[in-house]
Amino acid sequence: MQHFSHNGLTIAYRTFGHGPVHAIGFHGYGGSTNDFAPFARPLAEHCTIHAFDIWFNGASIWPPDRPVSDPLEPEELTELIRAYSDAHGIDRALYLGFSLGGRMAMSLMERLPERSRGMLLLAPDGLVRNPWYRALSRYGWGRALYRSFQEKPGAWFRTVDTLHRMKLVTTKRHSFLRFHTEDQGKRQLVHDVWLSLRLLEPDLRTVVRNLRQQDLHAHLYMGRYDSVIKLPWGQRFQRLAPDHIHLTVLETGHAVRTPELVAMLAAHPTLWK
C-alpha cells in the first residue's frame, strides 16, 4: 500500500497488473483496494489498475483537522487525480468504479474528460439522486436526525422491521439496511462517508456531453436482480447516449464482480485498444 498527497489530501492506492492501458479505480462502500484483486491476474496483460481507497474505507487519511461536515469538493478530487496522473506519467486513463466508486468515476468524467479514455462502471452509484441521502447529508436538520439515529437506533430498526413485515421493504433491502447500521461503528462509517462525499453528485447530462465531445465510451455492467443499484436506472442512463453508453446485464444482484464478469472483461473486443 502506498500513499499520494496533494493540496492537503492523502489517498492510499495499490497498483495491479502491468498492461499498457491505465485505469483509475474506486471500490464500493465498505470496501478497499482489495476489491480489485480478482482483476489482477486476468487483466494484467491488458491494463495497470491504480486502485484507490475512498476516505474512511481502507487506508486513506482524511485530514485530521478537517471535520467531515467540510466535504470533499468535486474540484479537489479532480485536482488530486490530475496530480496523481501527472506524477505517474498517465496521459489518459479508464475511469473505473464499482457501486460508490462509480459516483467517483462519473464525477471525474464530468470534470476531467480530457484525461480519460472512457469509463468502466460496475453497478455504479450516481445514476439517480437519492432524496434520503440528499436530506440526511446536505441539510442541518437531516444531519441532526442522523445523529439521533446513531445514538438511539431502536426506533429506526422497529420502523424498518415493520415495513419489511408489511412487504413495503424487500427482504434484500431489509438485510442490506440492517447489516450496514447494526452497530455504532457501521453507523459512524455511514455518517462519515455520506457527509464527506455529499458534494460528489455527477451531472449525468454533462457526463454524456463529455463522452460525445471526447468520442469516449462508457461500458456499464449491472445485475438484473440488483436491489441497491437498480437496472432501470442504468437503462435510463444508456438511453441518453446509446452510441456511447453500452449496457451489459448480468444475471446477478449487486455483487457483479464475479469470475464470469472478469472473464468477459478480459475478452472484451475494444475495451483495451
Image: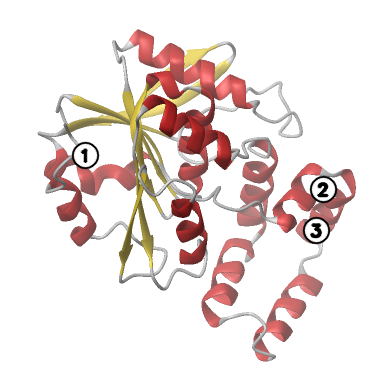
- Can the viewer see residue 75 in this picture? yes
Q: Residue 192 location, x and y as percent?
A: 66, 42
In terms of image quadrants, where is residue 173? bottom right
Looking at the rendered image, the disc whose residue lies closer to the viewer, 3 or 2, is 2
* Residue at the outermost bottom position: 166
Q: Residue 252 location, x and y as percent?
A: 34, 70
Per the image, label 3 sits on a secondary structure element best described as: helix
Front residue (pair 181, 251) = 251
Q: Answer with left or right where residue 162 lies relative to residue 265.
A: right
The residue beneath circle 3 is 151
Per the image, label 2 sits on a secondary structure element best described as: helix
Q: Answer with left or right where residue 100 lies relative to residue 41.
A: right
Quadrant for the C terminus in the image: top left
Amino acid at pointer 3: Glu
The image shows residue 39, relative to residue 118, as above or below, that is below
The residue beneath circle 1 is 271
